[in-house]
Image (cartoon, helix red, strand yellow):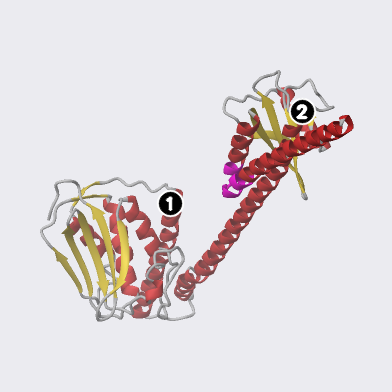
Amino acid sequence: MLVVGLVISALTVRVREEADAAQEREAETAELYEFTRDLAAASGIEEVMQAIITHIGQTLSREVVIFLSEGEAHKPRAASPGFSITESERAVATWAFQHDTPAGRGTDTLPESPIRCHPLKTSRGVVGILGVKPTDPTAHLTRRQRRLIESFASQAALAIERAQLAEQARHTHLLQATEELQTALLNSISHDLRTPLVSITGALSSLREDSIALDEATRRSLVDTASGEAARLNHLVGNLLDMTRVEAGAMRVAQEPCDVQDVIGSALERLEGLLKDRPVKVDLANLPLVSMDFVLMVQVLVNLLDNAIKYSAPGTPIDVCARVTNSHYEITVADRGVGIPPEDLARVFDKFYRVQRPDGVIGTGLGLAICKGIVEAHSGNIRAENRQGGGSIFTLTLPLAKGQTG
């Protein structure tokens, strides 16, 4: 009976130990699952590091810091609130990174340090260092906690590597988009700027040639051609500079009460030469003054009218209308041109985007993008739509001050 009792007692102890070990493994698996789930939900590297710090700090009751490489140095990128890093702790992290081995508290290397550093290793190498520091100096990691922190470090390394690769992919995509934009710009301006330059050069060469006898009418025609192409070239370059100002946020809007009739009149005056064979119908009701930047809004209308001229046949009318609707001010520019394909309506305000255009139309695809930038700087919006019976309508909407009505 004594022997049987001893055997049963030994078996009971073993079963209990196995049950305790199973419970520990279950708890570790549950904690590791929650940690992995939090890492999977993080979208960027900052969110990934915050998830690591929060989860490890709560699970192990320790302060956490993450070191990432920046060139030759290893700098802390994220840490628990109030966790200050000393130079000796930085040295421990550097040693762990260089030797790819845990160092610091509880290890064989620099055990007197208050921080314990674990390399964050993946198949591509060490991506960083995970440092943990107890809030209570007398608290030491148990065997289970040491095993758990190694699992956490392995998962954290994979998550950081994933976030870094995603960031590199986004950066590569941005570089590719920038290169495509630069190519589009070069392709656009190489043709649109060369055409007026060729015309100007040809006209000036003819005027300088002494061996060619030119009558007064021909000479006048060449001068007018050179002058017109120079004005067109100046307009193209001006659009490029305006777009640069809009994108850089350097365009300052000096808003003051303005009469829209004066704004429209100034725009028509600037395009007087191009509108000489165009009937322009202006429909203005009894309208209040509107807060806007006079010069910039004239530029918007000039671009819209120039667009209507380019995309409609000579002699066809252009309608300009201004009215007040609710608490907004609307100005529309409508033509009887080729219209806009429905699939292009949402893209006509994009930089360098041009609808399939008639032969002879010159432009960089920036005019409407500049209009959008200026109108949005006025807290307004602009839209394009097709006109019944043919043509297109561009409508810009500006907010009215409180108390203003039509």
Q: Pinpoint residue 234: horizontal percent, then vertical percent.
A: 41, 62
Query: Where 369 sits versus 105, above or below?
Result: below
What stretch of residues is rendered in magenta? 36-48
Q: Quadrant of residue 237?
A: bottom left
| Residue 360 visible in the picture | yes
For residue 92, the mark is 2
Q: Nearer the viewer, residue 205 or 18?
A: 18
Q: Main secondary structure of the magenta part?
A: helix
Horizontal side of 341 relative to 130 (left or right) equals: left
Q: Quadrant of residue 139?
A: top right
Q: Residue drawn at (33%, 64%), measured in percent from left and top?
A: 303
Q: CA distance from mark 2 to mark 1?
A: 49 Å
Q: Secondary structure at mark 2?
A: helix
Q: Pinpoint residue 115: horizontal percent, then vertical percent.
A: 72, 26
Q: Which residue is mark 1?
A: 245
Horizontal side of 222 relative to 130 (left or right) equals: left
Query: Where 361 sits versus 254, above or below?
Result: below
Q: Earlier in the sequence, mark 2 or mark 1?
A: 2
Mark 2: give few (<14), some (14-19) or many (20+) Cα within 10 Å: many
Horizontal side of 282 relative to 189 (left or right) equals: left
Q: Nearer the viewer, residue 42 or 382?
A: 42
Q: Pinpoint residue 170: horizontal percent, then vertical percent.
A: 59, 55
